[in-house]
Image: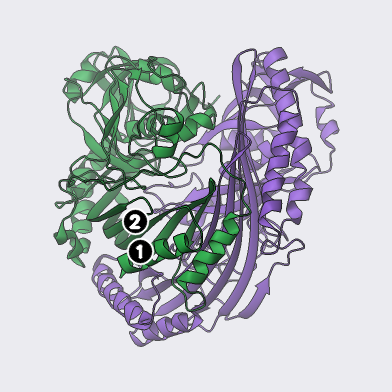
Chain colours: A purple, B green
Amino acid sequence: MHEDLAEFSLAYLKKAGVEYAEARLEEHQTNRFILKNSRLEAGGSNHYYGLGLRYILHKTMGFISANDFGKDDKEKIKQLMEQSLKLTAKSSKIKEAINFSPAQAVKEDYQTLQKIKIQDFPTEEKIKLIAEIDKSVLAAKVKVPNRYFSLSDDLLYKFYLNSEGTKITAKIPRVVLMYYLTLVENNQPVQRYWEYGSSCGYESFGRWQLDKKLPEEIKALAKNVKLGIKPPQQADVVVAPEVTGIMVHESAGHPYEADRIFGREAAQAGESFINQKMLGKKIGQECITVADDPTLPGSYGYFLYDDEGVKARRKLLVKNGLINEFLHNRETAARLSLASNGSARANNYDKEAMVRMSNTFLMPGNYTEEELFEDIKLGVYIKNFMEWNIDDKRLNQKYVGNEAYLIKNGRLTDQPVKKPAIEITTPKLWSSADAVANNSEYHAGNCGKGEPMQAIPVWFGGPSFRIRNLRLS
Amino acid sequence: MITHISEQLKKEMLKAGADEVVVITTQQKATQLKFVNNKIAKTGTEEFINYDLFITKNKKILTTSFMPSEKETIKEFCQKNVKLINYLPPNKNYKGLAEGPFKYRKIEQSYDPKIEKLGEKAVDIIEEGINAALTEGAKRVAGNLELYSFENFITTSHNVEFSEKGTKWYSSVRALVDQYATGHMTSCGRMLPIKIEETASFAGEIAKKAKNPQPGVEGKFDLIFEPLPLANLFNLAAYAASIFEFESGLSFLTRLNERFGSEKVTLADDATLPNGFNSTAADLEGVPTRRNIILDKGIFKTYLHNTSTARRYKTQTTGNAGLISPGPWNVWVAPGDHKKEELFKEIKRGVYITNIWYTRFQNYITGEFSTIPRDGIFLIKNGKIEYPIKEIRIKSTMPEFLKNISALSNKQHQIKSWEADTPTFTPAVLVKNITITKPK
């Protein structure tokens, strides 16, 4: 790679008089396979890399990215730095002053071990994995005319250094599978989309057991079309881990991003209904504790040091129902005279690091899932979902169940419920939750934020939990 | 230099055994200024070059990208990839590339050298934008200005050589009076002037009007959609015309020559528009681009194709490669004959929507979706804006929404945004009888 260029650029920026500088070199080796209706559309194999530089000049942030490194690479990057420094110097006359919280200088080299290595696992075997899932879907004796699978892997090498003496190298592998299925029952199309992802080798694929899960999902959806009833208008609801995950991510993860709170993402990603005065205030029942933890081994949102070189750790965003901690980078932490909690991430070398979630989940409680049903007279169990959305302050949200069942007199029945929709505000959601199970699962997604948009790998999850007395539509 | 490497890649790929090769080279320089709380929060300076390749051998298809490296020569890169392609199964649906050479017509208003020379003057443009929104009554202004200059070069094994040089700009301004009183607008183009003042004034005006919003309403309402939110929905409609999306089960446009919109709706994809943010004379296999009418007075007329998919459906390419997935370039919606103010007059009980986000589908084939209005939302009674409201959601299907469009304004805006990634030329519309919901 071009570590020497990163070192050169950092030295050049320091010499130019910047208050702070960092260099982030990233190299990706990726493969992608698209299987559509049993046919491999195409294979993809890409190798790309580049350098991202960030600095503070006159308390103004400058960012530079480049990938065209040839024989005269130092001269090219020098010209780009000069151009950027001029633009940033002029911008400093109307700057949003940037201060960084102090951070310890670290030298670290870490990597994720793979049992079945991405680079050694044969291409034909990768294709076979998705072809076999496709076969399992076809064997389910349900009409599934449209089947779309995308399998991707990525070997990321990252080299980070900053002007305070931090130097980190990281090697992180990722495997992700995404699918859309359309089944037709009683001439009605029904769809299922989901994603599985991990930061490890192809050993994760076996753990996902998709050849068993997907046929079960489509059989259940076919039954839902045939036998489903309308949801009751007023009912208790138990949501399964997949739905817990999206609820946590949208309404108990995003609002805790400190850059939103301070208005930095106001233009597109929006702000937050939460502000710094609300720290310590009640947002939900005591059973609700929400964590964000990038250090979970094998997790899709895995890292040990963030993209500002700060050591990652578990953060409890909500602790026993109280607003406890925000996600911070060094800039937002400085505004509250705190240390960064290691939440700065960029999705590639050509994007600035910003405050992001990693793996965000509801902490497990003491109940089994069955126990959540026990004192429900009339309720709905929502196993998975399709449509969902939330407003830009993270208050008004909606989740529409896909596979769902009726709960009656303390027991989960096999009576399917059609498209139960929860439309609720965030405080009402978390203050209506009264019991949390212990069956945690983690689900993969790509979270979007920033302008230009950065989609970043995350896990979201937790166990099933119970929400009392909701109006459904 | 870029043409030299591209040609070498093509030559070596064929020499290594590929049947077909497309090399798409993009060289781009970009500047970004991000502003927050009336101040510049970040400058961005970018330069990149990408060599993207599409290769086939015995109907096996591989996409790859080349990075110049001391560790690997072009020859070694090509040999490695042709070896890799052997492990893929053939795609019997694949029907080959377009045979050139082609003649290309020049896209008007696509390159403005003055954009390349703007440099630090971009800071002054930002100041003008911030001040314009503040003058309208905003307390805080946030947004983005992006400037691009680029050169593209496409060469294929089928006698195609195409090169193009262009510039672009994009601006997004969100004005905030307080957290519940906000307005947003974007603009984009290929030539100066950058219309940031106009964009910012509109955002500021909406924000000021949105002060003290009342709780939301629910039920059936007639809606006026500004171009910004409409671009999101027309983007989704145009993507649904991609034959790839249709085959994947991700399209509500399920049958040609059927009605999916009202007689008032004519929707096209057009890569030839002067000043169109994504206008280009050639698609990604080098076929000359053109205007394709997707919905002609509401009737679905064509899927978007590349050469291979068109041959499979026994039709002509529409110049929309994407070699794997055809897609639109610029979405274009025919304007109507109303002044925007006249659209309001037709409403007894309605809602004025200035922005939406998080449009999500329960089912792509039925087109069943919901979306969240954001920024200024206003209740309309008897032709007039009554007061701002908050926290509502729109629930509809794509066919219902398009069929219920009853009038369009006579002025288009070119919009690009987070959820309208493909630039969209659209007027404002009046859409009747759409369901609004709110949190319970």
Residue B270 location, quadrant = top left
Q: Crowding near pointer 1: few (<14 within 10 Å), some, many (20+)?
A: some
Query: Where A246 falls versus B132 (above or below)?
Result: above
Location of residue A57 in the rendering, given as x and y in whole percent from the top left corner: 34, 76
Which residue is identified by label 2? B155
What residue do we see at 48% from left, 33% from top? B245
Q: Is mark 2 in CB contact (under 8 Å) with mark 1?
A: yes
**Disc on res. B7:** 1
Are tags 2 and 1 found on a single chain? yes
Location of residue A204 in the rendering, given as x and y in whole percent from the top left corner: 74, 53
Secondary element under disc 2, as helix, strand or loop, is strand
Report the front residue among A398 and A426: A398
Q: Callout 2, which amino acid?
A: Thr
Location of residue B436 in the rendering, given as x and y in whole percent from the top left corner: 44, 20
Is residue A10 shown left or right of residue B138? right
Q: How many marks?
A: 2
Chain of the residue under label 2: B
Residue B255 location, quadrant = top left
- Visible in this render: residue B391? no
Report the front residue among A10 and B392: A10
Secondary element under disc 1, as helix, strand or loop, is helix
